[in-house]
Image (cartoon, grey):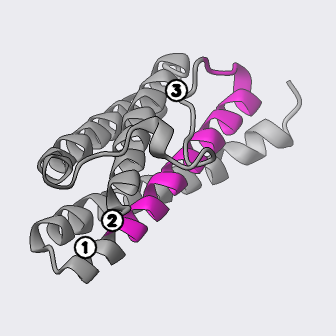
Amino acid sequence: MKLPIYLGLLHRSEHTLAASFRQVAEGHAAEPDVYYLCRSLADQCETHERALAPIVERYGEAAEEDEPERLHADELSQTRSGPVGLLRDLQDLYLLASLVDITWTAVEQAAQGLRDQELIDVVSRCDGETGTQLAWLSTRMKQAAPQALIVAE
């Protein structure tokens, strides 16, 4: 069974996304909505990690050396400055959240195949919240783009 590979990917990706949301919150603290929402979304990702714990305990989690080489993402180590920097940082978060979202989708398919109701319930709750994260990031990028790309500094 290869489910542990994707559980490991999901666990690490949620952790990475949480850390990245916190990085963007701190780096763009002058934008109150970004600061508070990114901190809240980081907390949400950490809740997803905790919800996965009993599932990982049951099925296991593949060590990184067992994971296909390209199935990972690094957290944001620093934020950029200015309006274009905010837009790029939000875009990076969107990419990370997209990885998490599609990984939840793959795990959901496995959960249905296994008829594991506990895992289906966790996926349903967490994947829905990841979808909301993606929607907010998309909306916030639409809001930031005109200022960042048209208005001269």
The residue shown at (63%, 40%) is 92
- Distance between the alpha carbons at the discs numbered 1 and 3: 33 Å
What residue did someone put label 1 on? 111
The quadrant in which residue 77 appears is top right
Residue under the image location 48 percent in, 60 percent down: 135
Q: CA distance from mark 2 to mark 1?
A: 12 Å
- In front of the other: label 1 or label 3? 1
Which SS class for mark 1? helix
Disc 1 and disc 3 in contact, CB within 8 angstroms: no
State the count of labels: 3
Q: Quadrant of the N terminus?
A: bottom left
What segment carries the magenta color? 78-107
Left or right of 87? Residue 6 is: left
Between tags 2 and 1, which lies in front? Answer: 2
Position above or below: 72 against 134:
above
- Give amino acid for label 1: Ala
Residue 74 picture quarter: top right
Tell me if I can see residue 57 in this picture.
yes
Using residue 151 as the reference point, say whether residue 96 is left or right of it. Answer: left
Q: Looking at the picture, how far across and down is residue 23, in whole percent?
A: 49, 22
What residue does disc 3 label?
24
The residue pinned by badge 2 equals 1
Is 81 displayed left or right of 71 in the figure? right
